[in-house]
Image (cartoon, grey):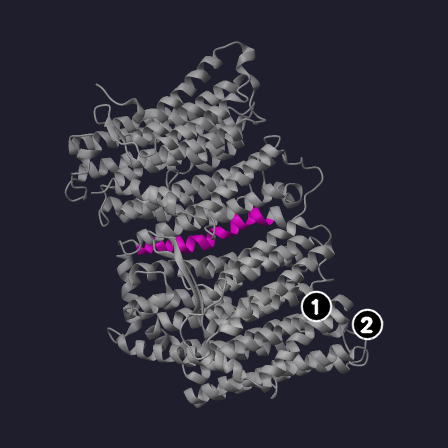
Amino acid sequence: MQEVAYPVLTTLVFFPLLAAFGLFFFRGDSAVRIYTLIVSVIELMLALPLFTHFKLDSAEFQFVERMDWVKHWGIEYYLGTDGISFLMIILTIAVLPLCVLCSWSYIKTRVKEFHFCLLFMTAACVGVFTALDLVLFYVFWEAMLVPMYLLIAVWGGPEKRYASLKFFLYTLAGSALLLVAIVAFRVVGGTFAIPELMEHSFTFGFQFWAFLALALAFAIKVPMFPFHTWLPAAHVQAPTAGSVILASVLLKMGTYGFLRFNLPLTPAATEYFAPFMIALSIASIIYGGAVALGQNDIKKIIAYSSVSHMGFVTLGIFLLNFRGLEGALFQMLNHGIVTGGLFMMIGAIYERSHSRDIFDNLGLGKYMPAYMGFWGLFALSSFGFPGTNSFVGEMLVFVGAFEYSPWVGAAIVPGAMIAAAYMLRVSLKLAWGRPTSWNGWKDLNLREWTYLAIPAVFVFYIGLAPTLTFRVMDASLEKLQNHVHTKAQLVSIEDGNPMEMAWDSIKNIVK
Amino acid sequence: MTFNPNLILPEIYQFLVIAALFIQSIGSAKMREKVGLWLPIACALGVVVAVVSVGQQGLVFWKSYQVDHLSQFFKAAIAIGFFVTVLNATRQPTLDKEKTTDYFLFLALSAWGLMILASAVELITMYLALELSSYSLYALVAVRAKSKDAAEAGIKYILFGAVATALALYGFSYILAGMHTTYLAELVKGDWSFAASPMAVTGMALFLAGMFYKLALFPFHFWCPDVYEGASNETAAFIATLPKLGAIVILIRLATMFKPGYDITTMLAVLGALSMTFGNLAALVQTDVKRILGYSSVAHAGYIMIGLVAGTAEGLAAASFYALAYVAMNLTCFWVVSRVAVDGRNLKLKDLDGLHKRAPVLAFSLAVGAFALVGLPPMAGFMGKLFLFSAGWNHGYNWLIIIAGLNTAISIYYYLGLVRHAYTKDAEDDVPLPDTSSFSLVGAGLLSVLVLALGLMPAGVFDLALNAGGSLLP
């Protein structure tokens, strides 16, 4: 056990929440902003023990805190982290100050409430990544819906009502069956605690349905191909900080859910459904990229590119080999950094031109060199240019895919090429198009330098020296992969034909 | 016959309140107008009395009146609900001054009937208690200034009530013929499969109709949205909450007879599924806030069936807990509705526009209430639903739980509509301002704290409910 003087994870979850209520004692917009910034930096400092005490070579859950919540039902307050969630927690916490900074002049109305939502979101997101009890997980999972809804619905663009409603309906519809699945796990497995449920072997019939219920919730969140339509709407209408949180943190919850629940809890069903999920992932990659190529709204391009990038992540997960898993987790982190950075850049240019259309922002290279420099960096990283962080992740997914089957590998090559095409298209126009609307816009100021330089550093750091990141995740992923394979062997598919079995169980219900 | 009057202390106390109101109502015209301070205080004391008597046990009045954990749990819930509705109704703009005491007299009588219902373990007693609480309400619905709609709603309520009662009595005769007893303790011993005693089961199904009517379960829900709409906001707050408690406690007592797999249990489950689906779908297209809440209570009646068909102590306890949570959530919503409609009008969705600016506390409470009704954590509705689902899974009605899960997804749209109007739109200028006195805000705040507390720390209350549910099953 790590010896830290205070319960780190609980503090990380509840400090922003308490601090959010502190907001009501402040008057004046800048006081609120400065207060929230200070809170977010303190939150980062509170996370320091995570770095110093995290055991790199252990696959066990660390920083575990456990106590009863509702004893009769066995609901517990159970937190912990391992190599899979560790990076996501750090990402969530690190995104918070950037969000405060990039909303400094962007958000002008109801500033206090805005920062309240930001802090509330952070608390809920850290909760999602640390919860080891299914009910606790669900509580945090849903708790982040309301502030995100408000972020879009109150501070969003002209079609905010449509976008926010779509976001809320999609994600809530997805998680309705998640609750049923959670209850089923508890009744069949006897506990809500995830680590204990992992040791349990469920019958294939149970895994089949549980996998589908979980996968629906997570696939909507990721979002995977047929469920992706809420994402562009939400991204385009959300304020900059909303987009950043959405892209950097919320989407990761879906893939994190796959890694934390589907793989370890329903291993046999995972292996059975893997080809199907791989097909959907490839569809996401190609489709997201192709649609991004046809957009003129910069934010839409990045939104669709998210669909495509998250396709790489889900692909990596369901390849079920070690390189694929590593690549997936790596891409989760990278996508958080790079897409977050790109959205902040779009926010910065929108504050100057009041338009997100490519053709209103042509030819900025000459007038705003620093801006275009950062843009170039993030754009290159986005399509996996060697030396940047995404290269490492995408490379690993490719290796995993070719290991799995050359055909799968071949199928995603066009995806990578389209990524280069749409990112270069928008970058070239922005940098060297014929200037149309520029009139004396200033290049980046100190505040913008700050919030862009931080992700830029990580682009290079992870791109050039990924060893430490690997060491964080390797032990846990190795355990996960072994776990899936051994557990899947344990459960035999009862009567040869799973589809028939599924059909029978539906018939039994109706009977 | 000797018995310990302590056993029925809450009922005696409530009766004293009724007596005081009665005396006041036959007093001089001036005397009749003011219930002002004393009634809320008396009701608060009533809550204390009811809470103190939790834990009493005994069987009185020739074995027809059972005081046990279940009845005391529900009596406490009824006392709390009554207290809140009385507070809510003290500022009723559409109530004639000279009718004030009469109004509260009927309200108190109805609550008294429900308290008796909570303890009734004999079919005739149940029937009498049910009618006592219903008749008072028939009168109340129509009392809304000179509103014709209210009169119409009153007629609807009476007619539906009369039909349901007739069905119940008809069913009662079958039960008596089939089982030769009206005592629940004896009835439980019978075999309630349709094959063994078709007559009694048919009778029971009809008798249940009376309860379904109170609960507004499909297909006995037709009165619900109309009556909510026609009655004044404050009366609707009462009708939407307390009578449901009475119906649920009876259903819980009767449900001990129904093992999963019996035809009558399956009928409950099917009605539950239909009720939640129909209620939620119908609510989607409503624009009147009270109609939305009306259809939402149809849906919630369906959810509660999950606990009743499980046939376990956990199931019954989950149903009790959900009933309590439901009352808390609905009272929160109705409190906000009553405070926003300062002139006593019916609220449309767009009347909620801009509430976040005009009365932030009310807007927050509305959000808490609405999201709790959806079943979003960490509110009471979520824990209630989780308990229901956990108790019901793997007892033969998994499909019902899956349907309930899907229904949550449907229902979010209209509940979110309430919040959406309150938070994301701005008000027009000519709409009257909501009540932002400290009375209104403190009430709203306390109710939302109650809803949140039931969701965050449900263990204590649930254990009480489990005692109550467990005491019924062998």
What secondary structure is marked by label 2?
A: loop
What secondary structure is marked by label 1?
A: helix
Camera sees residue A357: yes
Q: Position of residue B46 (x, y in %)?
A: 42, 27
Chain for numbered disc 2:
A
Quarter that holds the C terminus of chain B: top left
Camera sees residue B302: no
Q: CA distance from mark 2 to mark 1?
A: 14 Å
Q: Label 1: which residue?
A: A347
In terms of secondary structure, what is the magenta stretch mainly?
Answer: helix
Q: Label 2: which residue?
A: A442
Q: Position of residue B305 (x, y in %)?
A: 33, 45
User: Closest to the observer: B221 or A346?
Assistant: A346
Chain for numbered disc 1:
A
- Residue A186 figure quarter: bottom left
Instruction: Classify A116 as above or below B440.
Output: below
- For the point 35% across and 58% down, which residue is it? A183
For the record, the magenta segment spans: B398-420
